[in-house]
Amino acid sequence: MKKLEEYVVTIPDFPEPGIMFRDITSVIQDPDGLRLSIDGLTEKARQIDFDLIVGPESRGFIFGVPVAYLTGRGFIPVRKKGKLPRETISRKYDLEYGQAEVEIHKDAVKPGQRVIIVDDLIATGGSAEAAAKLVEDLGGKVVKMLFVMELAGLKGRERLKDYDVDSLIVYTGK
């Protein structure tokens, strides 16, 4: 079997010149790539004492749900504003050009629960930080953040310095 990084297709100059786009869909469309990513995240999660998995929309759902299932934990979605049907709390975060807002059900995390945040990619860290703040707003504790890929050149790990961050693949550039 190949290494996980061998399943990632890199597209140069997308979406603009100088950017090396790392395509996660090439990982999940291949059964072995998908297995390697889920197994890698699950192995890291099993080393932590935790109660819940939280995953940001939408690729956090792809990776977070199977990790929750395989570790016998529940999964909590963090969604774009206006997508959850019950009472929520929300957080805004900065994008390259503007802002986004995400929310979580107000009763999703109980005070004292230990949470792992799972997502496909850490770039600037904005969406992961927003998810973590939502967990903390509800009284939960983020004990780990797990990512399939990390774009180290965008310094997301620095933004998330107060959290235990781990990635299966780290790319030095942007």
Image (cartoon, rainbow, N blue to C red):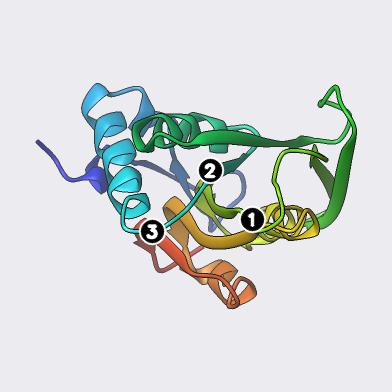
Task: Classify mark 2: helix, strand or loop.
Answer: strand
Q: CA distance from mark 3 to mark 2?
A: 12 Å
Residue 102 left/right relative to 49: right
Q: Earlier in the sequence, mark 1 or mark 2?
A: 2
Which amino acid type is shown beneath numbered disc 2? Ile
Q: Position of residue 36 (x, y in %)?
A: 24, 38
Q: Is residue 99 visible?
A: no
Neighbor class of circle 2 (other Cα within 10 Å; few <14, some 14-19, many 20+) is many
Task: Classify mark 3: helix, strand or loop.
Answer: loop
Residue 132 left/right relative to 134: left
Q: Residue at x 45, y 59 (%)?
A: 150
Which amino acid type is shown beneath numbered disc 1? Ala
Which amino acid type is shown beneath numbered disc 3? Ile
Q: Residue at x 54, y 44 (%)?
A: 52
Q: Say which residue label 3 marks.
A: 48
Q: Position of residue 45 (x, y in %)?
A: 37, 51
